[in-house]
Image (cartoon, grey):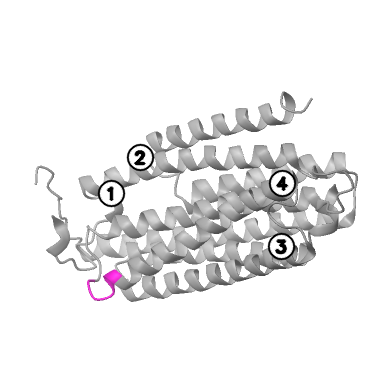
């Protein structure tokens, strides 16, 4: 193979450090999950509470956007190094997505 | 290939998913695919939003009459929790704990299957009411959008199950680590799409 995998055997200290780092990150993930549950609960409650649609719709869309950002940056690790190209791909898709939805909501029916 | 290289918890790399060239390529290729998936779902969302509540004159079906939030809430919790369990699976892959990863993936699959069960029940219920796929422009757009998501759940379940079965006796190596990683990305993306579905289709549908 042209591409060799460099194998590094960790010393006990390095190993313990890596374990602790991973455990810390996992605790952060659980916090992220708790926030996501909380955002979902707020969204459902807002709708059931029966506030004005003009208030609720932008608000729950904002909650959804926050939840998706959390999912992408923490659960899908986009906050980690080496996700530059991945971000480019995803945001290109998101741009086309936004244009598509905007077009269908404006030009097509009005 | 690294298929036969044996690792120990001490020699297992910090980022097993991108330690090989093949792993790096899978990772990039998969994000490109997710960009494409975003566009696919956007076109279905756009179609749904344009055709929502539209159909033959006198149509008795509207989003407000059809959708029931308790069911949607349960489905949302199931899928959101399955997203966390697949994070746990990847955490154990990082720690070179194959059994723990398999166990968390199994929980993920079970939660996903429960979600799919509820979705099938929901669709069955709508069809029973007469809200079939060809009933109106609204029904076609609804079933295509939510059904495509459901199909993704089904594919994800099959994918993760096959990965688990195929690698049961192998344990970890740098050949299958990127496969597990990419499958978990796919599963998270399914949850990303669902966040928009429960918000745009169900919650906004109940508001009117």
Circle 2 is placed at which residue position?
Answer: A82
Decide: is B54 above or below B63.
Answer: above
- The numbered mark, 3 or 4, whose residue comes first in the sequence reads 3
Task: Give the spatial CA distance, label 2 vs label 4.
Answer: 32 Å
Residue B97 horizontal side relative to residue B112, left or right: left
Helix, strand or loop at mark 3: helix
Helix, strand or loop at mark 1: helix
Q: Quadrant of the N terminus of chain B?
A: bottom left
Prevailing secondary structure class for the magenta stretch in the rendered image: loop
Foreground residue, B6 or B78?
A: B78
Question: Can you tell which quarter of the image residue B168 is in?
Answer: bottom left
Name the spot of residue A16 as percent of width and height, x first: 30, 65
Are discs 2 and 3 less than 8 Å apart at CB? no
Residue B110 horizontal side relative to residue A40, left or right: left
Are discs 1 and 2 less than 8 Å apart at CB? yes
Helix, strand or loop at mark 4: helix
Circle 1 is placed at which residue position?
Answer: B18
- The numbered mark, 4 or 1, whose residue comes first in the sequence reads 1
Name the spot of residue B151 as percent of width and height, x first: 53, 57
Q: 10 Å neighbourhood of mark 4: few (<14), some, or many (≥20)?
A: some
Q: Chain of mark 3?
A: B
Residue B28 included in the magenta stretch of the image: no
Task: Give the spatial CA distance, label 2 vs label 3.
Answer: 36 Å
Circle 3 is placed at which residue position?
Answer: B72
Task: Give the spatial CA distance, label 3 vs label 4.
Answer: 12 Å
- What label sits on residue A102 in the rendered view? none
Foreground residue, B206 or B119?
A: B119
Task: Give the spatial CA distance, label 3 vs label 1.
Answer: 37 Å
Magenta stretch, residue numbers: B166-170
Q: Nearer the viewer, mark 3 or mark 1?
A: 3
Residue at (66%, 50%) from the top-left corner? B197
Residue at (35%, 67%) from the top-left corner? B162
């Amino acid at each position: 193979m042209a591409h060799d995998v460099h194998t590094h055997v960790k010393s006990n200290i390095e190993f313990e450090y890596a374990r602790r780092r991973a455990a810390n990150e996992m605790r952060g993930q659980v916090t992220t999950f708790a926030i996501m549950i909380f955002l979902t609960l707020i969204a459902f409650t807002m709708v059931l509470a029966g506030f004005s649609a003009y208030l609720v719709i932008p608000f729950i869309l904002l909650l959804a956007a926050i939840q998706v950002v959390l999912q992408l940056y923490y659960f899908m690790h986009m906050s980690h190094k080496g996700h530059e190209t991945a971000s480019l791909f995803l945001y290109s898709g998101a741009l086309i997505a936004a244009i598509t939805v905007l077009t269908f909501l404006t030009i097509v029916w009005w | 290939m690294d298929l036969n290289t044996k690792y120990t918890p001490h020699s297992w790399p910090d980022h097993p998913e991108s330690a090989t060239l093949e792993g790096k390529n899978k990772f990039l290729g998969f994000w490109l695919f997710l960009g494409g998936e975003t566009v696919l779902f956007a076109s279905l969302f756009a179609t749904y939003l344009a055709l929502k509540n539209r159909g033959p004159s006198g149509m008795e079906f509207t989003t407000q009459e059809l959708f029931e939030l308790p069911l949607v809430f349960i489905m949302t919790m199931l899928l959101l929790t399955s997203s966390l369990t697949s994070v746990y699976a990847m955490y154990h892959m990082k720690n070179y704990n194959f059994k723990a990863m398999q166990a968390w993936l199994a929980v993920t699959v079970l939660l996903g299957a429960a979600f799919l069960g509820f979705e099938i029940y929901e669709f069955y219920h709508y069809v029973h009411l007469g809200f079939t796929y060809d009933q109106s422009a609204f029904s076609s757009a609804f079933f295509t959008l939510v059904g495509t998501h459901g199909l993704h759940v089904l594919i994800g379940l099959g994918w993760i199950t096959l990965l688990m079965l195929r690698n049961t006796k192998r344990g970890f190596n740098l050949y299958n680590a990127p496969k597990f990683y990419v499958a978990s990305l796919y599963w998270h993306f399914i949850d990303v799409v669902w966040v928009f579905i429960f918000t745009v289709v169900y919650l906004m549908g109940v508001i009117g």
